[in-house]
Image (cartoon, rainbow, N blue to C red):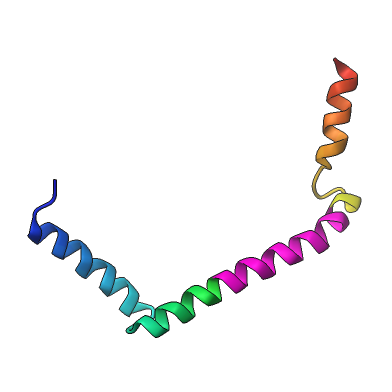
Amino acid sequence: MTTGNEAAAQVAKIGTVWAAIGITSWAEAASFLAFLLSLAALCEWLWKKLKPVAIRRGWIADRRTQKKRKADDE
C-alpha cells in the first residue's frame, strides 16, 4: 500500500513528465490526446493502403497464403 507521501510523489512525477513535454493545462492534455488519436488513425489508414504493396514486393508475407500452405501440408 502506498502512503500519502508516496502517492503525492507519484503524482508529482507524472506532472513533471507532462510539463516536460509542454502540457500544463487540461486543454493542452486533451489536444495532445486528440493528436495521438489522429496519428493512430492516420497510421492505420496508411497501413491499409501500403500493405498490399508490401505483400506484392515480398517485404511481408501474406497471412492468407501462409494459412493455405499450412492447411495443404497437413
Residue 42 location, quadrant: bottom right
Q: In which quarter of the image is the N terminus?
A: top left
From the top left corner, tell me how far across and down residue 36 is, in percent: 54, 71
Q: What stretch is highlighted in magenta?
A: 37-54
Can residue 45 be seen in the rendering of this structure?
yes
The residue drawn where x is 81% and y is 39% is 63
Q: Position of residue 64 (x, y in %)?
A: 85, 38
Left or right: 33 with respect to 41?
A: left
Q: Locate the C terminus and report the quarter of the image it occupies.
A: top right
Query: Which residue is located at x 33 percent, y 78 percent?
Result: 20
Overall secondary structure of the magenta stretch? Answer: helix
Q: Nearer the viewer, residue 33 or 57?
A: 33
Above or below, 8 against 63 in this view is below
Residue at the outermost top position: 74
With respect to residue 54, does 41 lie above or below? below
Quadrant in which residue 70 is drawn:
top right
In the image, residue 62 above or below residue 30: above
Q: Is residue 13 left or right of residue 34?
A: left
Q: Is residue 23 something one can see in this rendering?
A: no
Of residues 30 and 67, which is closer to you in this image? 30
